[in-house]
Image (cartoon, rainbow, N blue to C red):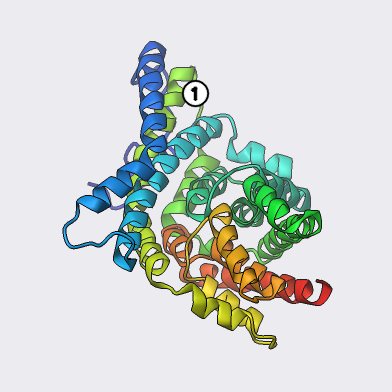
């Protein structure tokens, strides 16, 4: 067994040898893929019921208790993230067979700023929470897209999405929804641009840099669609094998906080008109884990208890863009130092937005 996992055939850098037949035929992928997609959709749609049923079968857990909510959250989000991860990685794997590192670098050469804007806009239309946006982030990094551009996507994907915008519009009106959209995209673009200018590629984990090097030095070719699907399947096996434990640990942390953090305590802190309320809201929000759509009803409840709008939105942004579970998962891809820099820059943008909203509204 080689020390470097990429010395053996793997999804992330190995090209099919000349004349090598695909592992499975197109007809096989069509039949099995259709069955798998139907099963995926059915399972995904029933996850809330499955999680609630399984939680209720555990002896000694009273329905509605903190422990019940934590366990139900864990049993729902773990398969949800793994299912999304599998589907996203497979899709990105297929795309990566066309998007070579050299082609990506050539297109974005001298256009990093445009790339940041494009990545942030792509992030808005992808309905992913922070943890399920990580696979696409990894795919972009592995494809040779500049690191700063990929960070713009990673920030925008969970922070701003169409569901969150509709809910904000319904709860608070057009002005708040528009301000949230503009500030969220601005944070993603500027933070990604700053991170890109800092030239932090050396702070990627070695196995991720190996993917890039393999792709740069030996750009793979895929003669048929079946070869591309083989690569995508290998990507799923390889990346999930490297990240599943981090995902489970991250969701476990989020589940504990989800079930036990008292809403009233947060409202009392965020409702105080003091300069430190915005930083305090960000600090409280970082360890949490939820999608923008999931946290907005909580923000609405906090506002009803007297929390300032800017403080509440800063809290929401920190939850969805800087969640502790996301950092745990990203640790498999980024060094601790790079994660720290990323958190510092994004947190600074969120603080600015919080103060700005409190001043303007």
Residue plotted at (56% across, 42% down): 143
141 shown above or below 32: below
Q: Residues within 10 Å of mark 1 (few under 14, many from 20)?
A: some
- Give left or right: position of 316 versus 233: right
Q: Position of residue 207 (x, y in %)?
A: 41, 53
Q: Position of residue 141 (x, y in %)?
A: 55, 49
- Disc 1 is placed on an element classified as loop
Q: Nearer the viewer, residue 122 or 49?
A: 49
Q: Nearer the viewer, residue 218 or 262?
A: 262
Residue plotted at (44% across, 39% down): 13
Whether residue 238 is visible to the viewer of this picture, yes or no, is no
Q: Nearer the viewer, residue 337 or 293?
A: 293
Residue plotted at (25% across, 48% down): 54
Q: Residue furthest top?
A: 27
* Location of residue 27 by image quarter: top left
Residue plotted at (76% across, 60% down): 176
Q: Nearer the viewer, residue 169 or 251?
A: 169
Quadrant location of the C terminus in the rendered image: bottom right
* Location of residue 249 by image quarter: bottom left
Q: Position of residue 173 (x, y in %)?
A: 77, 55
- Give left or right: position of 268 versus 107: left
- Give left or right: position of 113 versus 298: right
Q: Position of residue 236 (x, y in %)?
A: 39, 38
264 shown above or below 69: below
* Location of residue 301 by image quarter: bottom right
How many numbered callouts?
1
Report the residue marked by disc 1: 222
Whether residue 112 is visible to the viewer of this picture, yes or no, is yes
């Amino acid at each position: 067994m080689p020390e470097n996992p990429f010395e053996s055939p793997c999804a992330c850098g190995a090209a099919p040898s000349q004349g090598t037949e695909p592992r499975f035929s197109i007809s096989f992928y069509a039949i099995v893929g259709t069955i798998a997609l139907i099963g995926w959709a059915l399972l995904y749609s029933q996850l809330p019921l499955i999680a609630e049923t399984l939680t209720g079968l555990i002896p000694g857990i009273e329905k509605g208790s903190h422990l019940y909510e934590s366990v139900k959250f864990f049993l729902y989000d773990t398969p949800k993230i793994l299912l999304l991860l599998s589907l996203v990685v497979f899709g990105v794997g297929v795309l990566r067979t066309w998007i070579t590192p050299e082609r990506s670098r050539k297109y974005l050469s001298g256009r990093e700023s445009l790339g940041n804007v494009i990545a942030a806009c792509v992030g808005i239309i992808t309905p992913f929470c922070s943890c399920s946006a990580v696979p696409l982030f990894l795919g972009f990094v592995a494809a040779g897209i500049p690191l700063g551009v990929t960070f713009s996507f990673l920030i925008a994907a969970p922070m701003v999405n169409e569901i969150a915008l509709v809910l904000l519009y319904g709860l608070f009106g057009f002005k708040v929804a528009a301000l949230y959209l503009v500030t969220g995209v601005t944070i993603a673009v500027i933070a990604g641009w700053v991170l890109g200018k800092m030239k932090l590629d050396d702070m990627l984990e070695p196995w991720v840099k190996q993917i890039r090097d393999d792709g740069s030095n030996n750009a793979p070719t895929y003669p048929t669609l079946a070869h591309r699907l083989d690569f995508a399947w290998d990507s799923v096996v390889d990346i999930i094998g490297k990240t599943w434990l981090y995902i489970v640990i991250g969701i476990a942390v989020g589940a504990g906080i989800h079930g036990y953090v008292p809403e009233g305590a947060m409202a009392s802190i965020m409702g105080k008109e003091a300069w430190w309320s915005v930083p305090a809201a960000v600090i409280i929000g970082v360890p949490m884990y939820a999608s923008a759509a999931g946290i907005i009803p909580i923000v609405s409840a906090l506002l009803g208890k007297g929390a300032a709008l800017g403080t509440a939105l800063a809290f929401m942004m920190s939850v969805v863009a800087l969640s502790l579970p996301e950092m745990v998962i990203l640790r498999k891809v980024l060094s601790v130092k790079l994660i720290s820099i990323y958190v510092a820059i994004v947190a600074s943008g969120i603080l600015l937005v919080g103060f700005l909203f409190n001043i303007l509204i």
